[in-house]
Image (cartoon, rainbow, N blue to C red):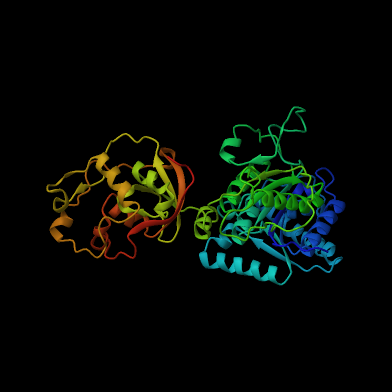
Amino acid sequence: MARARHPCTIVIKLGSSSIVHEKTHQTLLSLLSSLVETVVLLRAHGHKVVLVSSGAIAVGLKRMNLASRPKSLAGKQALAAVGQGRLIGLWDNLFSQFDQPIAQVLLTRGDIADRTRYLNAVNTFKELLSMGVVPIVNENDTVSVSEIKFGDNDTLSAVTSSMLHADYLFLLTDVDGLYTSNPRKDPHAQHIEVVTSIAAIRSQVSTSTLGSSLGTGGMETKLIAAEIATGAGVTTIICSSKRPESILPIIEYHHAQKASSSNPGTPASDSLPGSGRTSPTLEPADEPEIVHIRPPHTVFTASLLPMRDLKAWTSHTLFPAGSVIIDSGAHNVLSRRESGGRLLAVGVFGVIGAFASGQAVRIVIRKNTSPGSVAARIPSTLAGETRPASPSILAASSMTSSVASLEPLSRSVSSASLADVVMVAKSEEYTDADVIEVGRGLANYNSAQIMKVKGLNSSYMPQLLGYADSEYVVENITIRVPP
């Protein structure tokens, strides 16, 4: 059998409704067997495959002869405990027919919230793949609570593909792609083949009616997953779970598209993952041209400038402990790639909640940005006189200092000039209802310390805080909502 010239890492997600019949809760053995054959075929072509499998609660329903999912958290967790063992046993039985070893990987968001544990999970995945094992991933529903849940396995599969720097994420569902409306109810629903902007496509499609009683998500969760995965450089594909054998032809189709895109006149709408990873392209050769028919599917093109690993981890795997309010100048600068995702105190307007150093925080802006209060006075040693800093001055200095510090931390600050730095005007308290989240980052200082230095030049941090490990109050910031 011919092996791929450039093997890919492929993550395949299968939902509960593709594993268990929605009404009878009987296992859909023919579909699962077809998927297992496909995975084995992909492995024979040299690809590495990770399977994200839902279905623990659904399998538990059948085992306990229950008609529907329980509403209580404890009930769902108990059914997950009953069903997970039977589910992994089913997968092991099917794969063992082909002598293909598998491994069970159960995750919660809490398992990878710690950077060390996250890297351990990544290393475990890589080791399993290097050993020729197919990891089968599911959320650990038995112990998950809302604060540490991924929410659905679409999100889990996207985070997994980001962790592995995968080439493809396949989201298998009961339709063969993204439609403008529900194709099961609307005969005029139009199939969308290529999505280059998820933000733009949201206004063109209806996602509210798709999904099943067994699963937790519908098409909307797949758009969210595609947003996470493509932002990390992973080409994301929605296709039918009823025809898993189409996965290999889809990959070959996109290989051919990539090979032909060397012609400048060829559209690159079906482009594969961008720079920073091994691109599964075909090298020019004197071989007869093969016509690849496009199997039904929707492809979400990967970002050409994928989010680096640490930013992806901060943005998608951590549960934010609080919020840092930034001004408009800082928002503008942080939206630029050259900012490096680092925020100085001068661009901070305030904080919401209590958080520790090292925790993830939301980056937010105020809904009402009218100048109401002034955060600080500019020291007389810098401005010539002690006077309130105008909002325009603060915004301007934010735009400059959010990228690079105006003053080095080692600069000596006299006690006289430090005394001139006075918090003035009214001290406003903000809640989540007063702000809009525009991104996320990792705090270098706790909430109380950031409040002490908000709006100030970094040179004042050592004496105000007693130390300064970093001139940046928040790092690894990913801005999701541009100005």
Total labels: the figure holds 0
The answer to which of 386 and 88 lies nearer the viewer is: 386
The answer to which of 172 and 418 lies nearer the viewer is: 172
Q: Residue 108: horizontal and vertical position, in percent?
A: 61, 58
Q: Residue 131: horizontal and vertical position, in percent?
A: 71, 72
Q: What residue is rendered at 81% in x and 55% in y? A: 35
Quarter of the image where the C terminus is located = top left
Could you tell whether 23 is left or right of 365 in the image? right
Q: Quadrant of residue 373?
A: top left
Q: What residue is rendered at 26% in x and 39% in y? A: 392
Q: Residue 100: horizontal and vertical position, in percent?
A: 80, 67
Q: Quadrant of residue 99?
A: bottom right
The reply to whether residue 75 is visible in this rendering is no
Quarter of the image where the N terminus is located = bottom right
The answer to which of 85 and 202 lies nearer the viewer is: 202
* Residue with the most extreme front position: 286
Could you tell whether 315 is left or right of 141 in the image? left
Could you tell whether 273 is left or right of 178 in the image? left
The reply to whether residue 367 is visible in this rendering is yes
The answer to which of 80 and 66 lies nearer the viewer is: 80
Q: Residue 37: horizontal and vertical position, in percent?
A: 83, 58
Could you tell whether 400 is left or right of 5 in the image? left
